[in-house]
């Protein structure tokens, strides 16, 4: 079974530029999560999708971050414009269903450096 | 608001020794997860604990859950260098769309 795929793996941009990350979850997983992980910290949830609907985006900085999950499969996360404090690893995770006791499976992450 | 606290946050130990990482959480939940993260890598699921008294073991790692005490432990037996990593616990928050609330992580270094 293929795992969660993410691209790119690394990205370096200057502040005020824009960037987009892509995630393909495990086949059949209805729930998709985007996390931000700053070095030395635990993951912070940015947005949670159930199929193609948003379940929770309360911690997403909506003035600069946006995310979509068209057709309930792949998802993209965009930052525009980027700030220095956005430097982090962006992790995508998926789980089988939202209400079940199923662990989340994580992709390899995208390491973003904003200079 | 559900809070999750891990301790210690950093642990350096010798190979062959035993040690325990603690994960306390502040409100009712009976689903707790342990993950491992190697430097520069993603998060790997280790254990899913779904009820009070749950105990799971994999190799030299054993995790347990006491929902009444709101405490989970990750016990390392006869540590080996390959177990060096950061270990996170996370708790299902029923009041927040079943989000996982994460501990800060325990960085474990095992010296030969």
Image: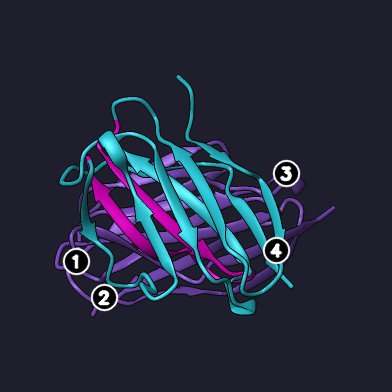
> What hue does chain B carry in this figure?
purple
Determine which residue is flagged by label 4. Answer: A13
Give residue B2's mark.
2
Q: Give x and y (percent) for residue A16.
A: 61, 74
Q: Residue at x 39, y 61 (%)?
A: A66
Which quadrant holds residue B32?
bottom left
- The residues colored magenta run A29-51
Few, some or many residues within 10 Å of mark 4 (<14, 14–19, 20+): some
Q: Tell me the distance, in whole angstroms, between the alpha carbons under discs 1 and 2.
A: 9 Å
Left or right for A55, reference A3: left
Whichever of labels 1 and 3 marks the residue nearer the N terminus, that label is 3
Q: Chain of mark 3?
A: B
Secondary structure type for disc 1: loop
Chain under disc 4:
A
Q: Which residue is drawn at the image coordinates 73% and 61% (left, top)? A: B109
Specify the subunit that label 2 lies on: B
* Mark closer to the observer (1, 3): 1
Both marks 3 and 4 on one chain: no
Secondary structure of the residue carrying tag 4 is strand
Q: Label 1 to label 3, Cα distance in Å?
A: 36 Å
Query: What crowding class fits label 2: few (fewer than 14 Cα within 10 Å), some (14-19), or many (20 or more)?
Result: some
Q: Chain ID for label 1?
A: B
The numbered disc on residue B82 is 3
């Amino acid at each position: 079974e293929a795992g969660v795929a993410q691209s790119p793996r690394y990205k370096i941009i200057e502040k005020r530029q824009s960037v987009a990350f892509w995630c393909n979850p495990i086949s059949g997983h209805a729930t998709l999560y985007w996390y931000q992980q700053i070095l030395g910290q635990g993951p912070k949830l940015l947005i949670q999708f159930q199929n193609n609907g948003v379940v929770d985006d309360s911690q997403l900085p909506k003035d600069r971050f946006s995310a979509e999950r068209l057709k309930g499969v792949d998802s993209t996360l965009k930052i525009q414009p980027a700030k220095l404090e956005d430097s982090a690893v962006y992790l995508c995770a998926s789980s089988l269903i939202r209400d079940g006791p199923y662990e989340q499976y994580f992709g390899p992450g995208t390491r973003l450096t904003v200079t | 608001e559900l809070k999750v606290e891990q301790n210690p946050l950093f642990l350096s130990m010798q190979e062959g020794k035993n040690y325990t990482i603690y994960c306390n959480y502040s409100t009712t939940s009976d689903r707790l997860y342990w993950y491992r993260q190697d430097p520069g890598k993603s998060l790997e699921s280790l254990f899913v604990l779904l009820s009070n008294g749950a105990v799971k073991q994999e190799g030299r790692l054993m995790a347990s859950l006491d929902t009444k005490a709101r405490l989970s432990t990750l016990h390392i037996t006869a540590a080996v260098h390959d177990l060096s990593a950061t270990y996170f616990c996370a708790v299902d928050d029923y009041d927040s769309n079943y989000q996982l609330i994460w501990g800060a992580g325990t960085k474990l270094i095992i010296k030969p």
